[in-house]
Image: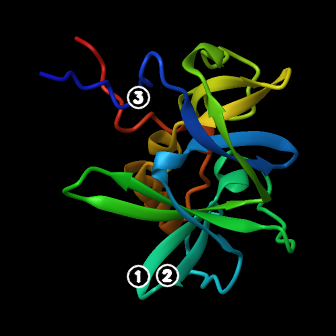
Amino acid sequence: MATLARKDAPAAAEPCQYLTFTLGGEMYAVETLSVKEIIEYGQVTTVPMMPSSIRGVINLRGAVVPVIDLKARFGGQPTEVTRRTCIVIIEMGGSDECQVLGILVDTVSEVLEIPPGEVEAPPAFGARIRADFIRGMGKVGGGFVILLNVEAVLSTDELSVLDELSRQGTPVDTGALPRLGSSVAG
């Protein structure tokens, strides 16, 4: 009988593949298993009264896909669109319910294989983004790549709270929001 590895922990011997991209000069990565496709920035329809981190929606082969501006999601200025700006389509969730979201990035770099032994724990302080958004720090070529926890970054529960707060006209500090979906051991 085979044993299943935890979803958030890579297999002990096998390196994971990550799609790397840049945001504001920093290198980030997401596991390729969650990446559905990469498209060039195009017709994004703005949706009124959304938080600044929700850029709008796109039509992806007949499906409405929300586009999240990661720079704004991390508390920075909205992404300035250039000819290298891309939308990475991410598929989240299990087999019974799948959520498809787009993330806006400055540039897509490459796919890297990072062995589990080359992944360090997230820093306890000093990161420009919330600690629960970081899965780990991948050591690549003498530097680090920030490995994102897409489930936390793109939490639909938290994005719904942001939407509701923005509809009420309440200023939103994303760093002060509770970590939705996290459980407390008791």
Q: Which mark is residue 60?
A: 2
| 10 relative position to 77: left or right | left
Determine whether the residue tagged by mark 2 lies in a helix, strand or loop.
strand
| 36 relative position to 83: left or right | left
Q: Is residue 129 above or below residue 86?
A: above
The span from disc 3 to disc 1 (Cα, nearest Å) is 28 Å
Q: Are marks 2 and 1 in contact (CB under 8 Å)?
A: yes
From the viewer's side, name the closer residue of 161 and 55.
55
Residue at (78, 40) in percent of width and height: 27
Residue at (47, 50) in percent of width and height: 34
Task: Say which label, 3 or 2, has the lower sequence index.
Answer: 3
The residue under label 1 is 63
Q: Which mark is residue 8?
A: 3
> Residue 1's x, y, as percent?
11, 21
* Mark 1: few/some/many CA within 10 Å (<14, 14-19, 20+): few
> Residue 70's x, y, as percent?
66, 53
Residue at (30, 19) in percent of width and height: 184
